[in-house]
Each structure stands twice: as C-alpha cells, then as structure tokens.
Image: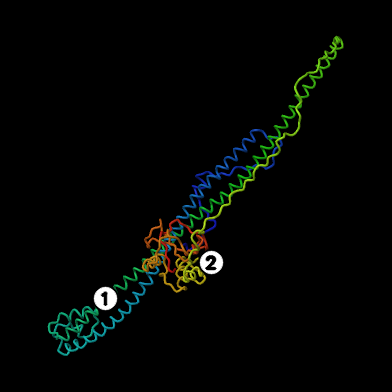
Amino acid sequence: MRFSKRCAVISLTFALTLGGVGFAAPALADPGTPTAPSWEDVAAARDDVAKSQAQAAAIQTTIQQLSDASDAADVATQQAAEKLQVARQKVTETQQRLDDLHARLEAAKSDDENARKALGSIIAQFARAGGGTGVSAALLSGGKTDGSDLLYELGTMEKLSSGQAALLDRAKQTSNLVTTLEDQTKAAQSENVTAQKEADAAFKTANDRANAAQAAVDNAQVESATLNAQLAFLQDRSASLDSAYAAAQAQAAALKAQAEQAARDRAAAEKAARDAAAAAAHPPVTTPPVTRPPATGGGHTGGGNSGGGNTTPPVTTPPVTTPPAGGGGGAPVGPAAAATSAVNFAYAQLGKWYVFAGEGPDVWDCSGLTMIAYRQAGINIGYHTVGAQYRQMTAVGRLVPRSSGLVPGDLLFYSQGGNTNSQTMYHMSIYVGNNQMIEAPEPGKKVQLVPVRTRNLVPNVGRPAG
C-alpha cells in the first residue's frame, strides 16, 4: 500500500540488467536478401540469432528476479503503511488523553489559584503583626516572587495554626499537581510527535524502495521488448538467407547435373557413331532363331468365389457408465445475511481508487473497506487497521482455520510468512466465493476482484457472520 503512483518509466542506471548481462543490440543489416549469399553470410546470421536469443532469455531471468524483488518491496510498503495507520490511531487515542490532561491541568491551576488566595489571609495577619514571624519583607510587601518561594518560607514558619497549616498543605498539593500535569502533557506531546515522524519516515523509505523496484522492472521490460523485436528481425533475416543459400545451392547442383548429363550424352553419341562405323565395315553373321516347345504342367487357378459365404462380425456395444448416486454431498450452505450484505457492498466498490486511510465513500484502503463493509451490515469487526480487526475476531471467537474451507464474507489476513502475530499483519481482503477475493490493493490501483493469493496468507480467517 503506497502513497505515490508507480512510475511507468524512471531514468535508472541498472547495472545488473543492462550492464552485467551485456545487452548490446546487434547491428541491423539491410533486410534485403542477397541473391546468392555465401555460407559465411548464413553462419553469421545464425550466430546473430543465437546471441540475441541468449540475451532475450537472460533478460527474462532478470525480469523474474526483479519482479520477485518488487513483490517483496510491495510487502514492505504495506507493512510500513499498516504501522503508520497504527501510529495514527495511537495519536488519536493519545490526543484524547492530552485533552483530559489539559482539562485536569486547568482545574488544578484553578485550585492552586484559590489555595494561594486563601494563603493571602495568613500573609495579611503576619503583616499586621509587624512581620516578625520569619516571613521575608518581599513577601509581606507583595513583591514579585516565585510561588515555590512563598510556599517554602511559609512552611518554615513555626507559629502556624492548624487551619493555616492545612491551607499551606493544600497549596503545596495543588502546586505539585500542576507541575506533574504540565510535565505529563509535554511528554505526551513529544511522544506523539516523535512516533508520527518515525512512522512517516519509515513509510516514505518503503514507498521509495517499492517505486524504484517497479521502475527497474519497467525498464527491464522495455529492454526485453526491444530485444524481442531485434530477435524477430534477425530470425527473419536468417531464414531468408538460409532459403536463398539453399536455392542457390540447388540451382548450382541442377546446373552441374545438366552439364554432367550433357557430357554423358555426347560420350554416348560419339560411342554410337564409332560402333556404327565398325558395324558397317564388318557386317555380323545372321543365325536363325531356335524354336522351343511351350512349357507344360501347372494347373490353372480360377478366380471364383470361395464357398464359405460372408461372415459379419458381431457389433460391439460400449458399456453404459452410470454416474454414482449422491452427487458429491449436496449444495453448499450460503452465508448469513450480514456476510451477504458485506460481500455485496464490497462488489459495489469495485473500480474505486485506493487512498491510504480511505474509509469511503469514493476511496478505500484495505482495512477501511472491510471495516465499512461489515459496519453497514451491523457488525463491528474492529477499528481501522489490519491487526485490530484480527484481534477483534480473536476476542469474539470468530477465527476459523482456513483449512476447514472458505465461505463468502470471510476476512483474509496477510503477514510476512503467514505469521499469526497481529502486530506483523499488513494487508487484508474479503472472500467472495469461487476462490476470489475483493481488495483495495495499493496506491495507483483501484478496488479489484482477484484470485485468492496464498503467499503470506495467515492460516486463520475471520468469519464475522454465518
């Protein structure tokens, strides 16, 4: 879950992808095919194809590695966002405590002021008595002094009545209470500011890391597309050269065969001429042919039909398979009305943008969507963080093992390694059936319907109703 939308293209020097693998684009030749390429041309083209194929395969491996790194960065960002949301919730709770401290502080200051006014009567009595009781001249004369000085000097006096001593004790108590409340207020304010700054900084760091990781994937995919286009070009060129070379070789072979046949024809004609000349000079002696009687024996084999008649093979009928009775155990039981209402509400939010800490009606984050989906159905599943909603399901006995099967309306929780510690959970969604869930994924994306992801999925699910 990230604040800023992922950049589509970021200018980034990525040594592993572009430098380490060495993706140098092969020089592209004129696509025109030579009439009769040499074998060296064909071999060079095949070598270009092999190199380009190796480069394309290497960058695909790199893209997979970068995608894995980007997924890990996404998880880190979602974890940081969850911590930020928890910190903001604590700020809200602490602000309520600060408001209470302020109210108590104002009341304590009022009590302190009243107590000090009551001490004025003591000072007036000592002033009328001539100031010889240990009270400093500055106090008796109404000079500006620190309040603690007044209480201290009055406390050193030996001739205070019980009533005066009681007033003095009350003044000391109210003064101490004011001091204590002021210190607590300052400490709480400082704690809030520090926690908020730390959470904001952690979220920014994780978000920047995720953006950089995705930018690396985007750049590698652009490089992959370029290499694939070059590979297609080189494959076409190599195929053309192979075809042209094969045609040229076939033509050369045909010409050679024609020449060899012509030479054989000439040699045969010359031999025939020589043989004819020799025959004319020496005519052959004619020998009468020898007549032989025809061969006998061996009966005639007729072509009639055999007397056995035709035999028709039996028709084989395939066995009829009857499905077993029972049909698999009957129809599944539907969710309760509240779960159905929550699922329908989630469907109605599809396509709305993700915004961190969004609670609708037009923007959502993951735990905001699930919280409002069940709140409108009349069920409280906890306040606006993933961990809080998991703890609420635990507290009301509404956690069930995921292995027992999912039903629409179930809450799915994600943490690193599927840990069941609610403090480590960073994302959640609502199951809607058919192995699909609805989630508000991250900045730059909209509420979506996707297949259930099992990576980092907690083994327990929340079932608020049904």
**Precedes in sequence: disc 1 or disc 2:** 1
* Residue type indicated by callout 1: Thr
Instruction: Judge the density around disc 2: few (<14), some (14-19), many (≥20) Cα neighbours within 10 Å.
Output: some
Please name the residue shown 31% across and 80% down the image.
106
Q: Secondary structure at mark 1?
A: helix
Q: Residue furthest bottom?
A: 128
Q: Secondary structure at mark 2?
A: loop
Position in image of residue 109 (x %, y %)? 28, 81
* Residue type indicated by callout 2: Leu
In the depicted structure, whether residue 183 falls above or below residue 407: below
- Tags 1 and 2 touching, CB below 8 Å: no
For disc 1, the marked residue is 179
Q: Quadrant of the C terminus?
A: bottom left
Quarter of image, res 411:
bottom left
Q: On the rendered structure, is 379 left or right of 174? A: right
Q: Nearer the viewer, residue 451 or 180?
A: 451
For disc 2, the marked residue is 350
Please name the residue shown 34% across and 74% down the image.
98
Q: On the rendered structure, is 145 left or right of 413? A: left
Task: Give the Cα distance between marks 1 and 2.
Answer: 54 Å
Position in image of residue 1 (x %, y %)? 46, 62
Q: Which label was assigned to residue 3?
A: none
Q: Nearer the viewer, residue 172 or 188?
A: 188
In the depicted structure, whether residue 429 falls above or below residue 252: below
Please name the residue shown 48% across and 71% down the image.
337
Q: Nearer the viewer, residue 370 or 333?
A: 333
Quarter of image, res 427:
bottom left
